[in-house]
Image (tube, rainbow, N blue to C red):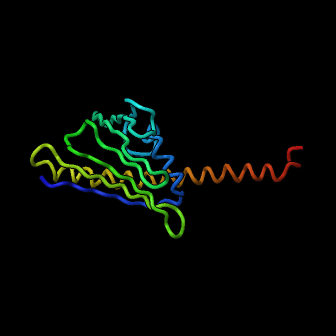
């Protein structure tokens, strides 16, 4: 049975620390992605070996965080929920020369039901690139909002006479 690999990449204007922070906040993933409801399962959320579930269209996928490299990489494995074996997703964050971050989301897996590999490759081949694009858009929005809030604070501090 051949090992399957699907990947998606997107560039965001946000820096890697912003993207990394968003990735560690798995309870918020449904707010910016195609994933459904978040459920905590075990461990301290966002920490190594924490386990959570996402319930999307009736499918409950349970995932464990297995690698955290600050501002560089987040990896998780599928514990249960889909007929795949040895599923692992690696999300790499690479600085772009012109600023921002390249997000590369790669999943590898084996199918467990004979004859379904092509179907899972097709399903995941659409889903994984969408996750990368949605993360990039959300991170850009979050970075812009943080920059605007900071600029407003600086302006308020710089003009104390306006408060009199």
> Which quadrant holds residue 132?
bottom left
Q: Nearer the viewer, residue 28 or 41?
A: 41
Q: What residue do we see at 26% from left, 46% from top? A: 87
Give how far across and how far down residue 60 sits, in percent: 29, 34
The answer to whether residue 68 is left or right of residue 8 is right
For the C terminus, the quadrant is top right
> Residue sitting at 14 percent across and 55 percent down?
2
- The structure residue drawn at horizontal position 27% and vertical position 51%, both measured from the top left corner, is 124
Point out residue 59 in the picture as x, y percentages from the top left corner: 27, 35
Q: How far from the left and from the top, in percent, is residue 128?
A: 33, 52
- Residue reaching furthest left? 114
Most distant residue in the bottom direction: 97
Q: In the depicted view, which residue is nearer to us: 50 or 102?
A: 50
**Residue 94's spot in the image, x, y percent?**
45, 61
Number of labelled discs? 0
Q: Is residue 98 above or below residue 146?
A: below
| Residue in the picture at 27% in, 55% down | 125
Left or right placement of residue 159 versus residue 26 in this view: right
């Amino acid at each position: 049975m051949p090992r399957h690999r699907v990947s998606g990449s997107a560039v965001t204007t946000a820096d890697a620390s912003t993207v990394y922070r968003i990735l560690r906040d798995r309870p918020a993933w449904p707010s910016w992605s195609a994933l459904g409801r978040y459920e905590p399962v075990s461990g301290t959320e966002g920490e190594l070996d924490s386990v959570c579930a996402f319930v999307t269209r009736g499918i409950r996928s349970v995932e464990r965080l297995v690698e955290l490299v600050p501002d560089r990489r987040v990896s998780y494995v599928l514990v249960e929920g889909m007929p795949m074996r040895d599923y692992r997703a690696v999300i790499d964050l690479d600085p772009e020369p012109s600023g921002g971050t390249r997000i590369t989301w790669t999943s590898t897996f084996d199918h467990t039901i004979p004859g379904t590999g092509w179907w899972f490759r097709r399903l995941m081949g659409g889903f994984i690139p969408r996750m990368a694009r949605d993360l990039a858009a959300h991170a850009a929005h979050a970075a812009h909002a943080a920059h605007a809030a900071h600029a407003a604070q600086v302006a308020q501090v710089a003009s104390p006479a306006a408060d009199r």
